[in-house]
Image (tube, rainbow, N blue to C red):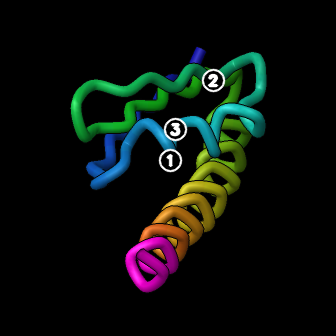
Amino acid sequence: MRRARVETTHEDASTVAAALRPDNTPSMTTDVADDVVRTVVERETAGGLGSTLDDYVVNLTVAETVVRTARGHNHNHE
């Protein structure tokens, strides 16, 4: 079994994590501690692990961008 842990820091970590969880496969877990999103991925092969991590990073980038955009939108309309 191959395993990777990805930890990223966000201003709104719980919202980023909530956006990521629906795309998690059964081999992934995501949790939040303070401002850190922590995701653990386990796969049988290094290739599978790499593919899953590639997908995760894309999803993480989109989630962070959406949260940042929404936060900016909310500040502009208060």
Whichever of callouts 1 and 2 sits on the residue coming sooner in the sequence is: 1
Q: Is residue 41 above or below residue 8?
A: above
Report, in whole angstroms, how far the alpha carbon at label 1 lies from the one at label 3.
4 Å
Residue nearer the viewer, 74 or 7: 74
- For mark 1, what is the residue? 16
Quadrant (top left/top right/bottom left/bottom right) for the N terminus: top right
- Residue 17 pos. (x, y %): 52, 38
8 left or right of 16? left
Q: Are marks 3 and 2 in contact (CB under 8 Å)?
A: no
**Depicted 36 relative to depicted 51: above or below:** above
Residue at 77% across / 27% down in the picture?
Answer: 25
Q: Pointers 1 and 3 in contact (CB under 8 A)?
A: yes
Q: According to the image, label 3 marks what residue? A: 17
Most common secondary structure along the magenta stretch: helix
Occupied quadrant, residue 21: top right
| Three-letter amino acid code at the position of disc 1 | Val
Magenta stretch holds residue 35: no
* Residue 70 percent across, percent down from the top left: 54, 70
In the image, residue 45 above or below residue 74:
above
**Range drawn in magenta:** 72-78
Give the foreground label among 3 and 2: 3
The three-letter amino acid code for the residue at tag 2 is Met
Residue at 51%, 62% (x, y): give it: 67
C-beta proximity under 8 Å, tags 1 and 2: no
Label 3 residue SS: helix
Determine which residue is flagged by label 2.
Answer: 28
In the image, what residue occupies the spot 28% across and 38% down?
Answer: 36
Q: Secondary structure at mark 1?
A: helix
The three-letter amino acid code for the residue at tag 3 is Ala
Q: Residues within 10 Å of mark 1 (few under 14, many from 20)?
A: many
**Splitting the image into 4 quarters, where does residue 42 fall?**
top right
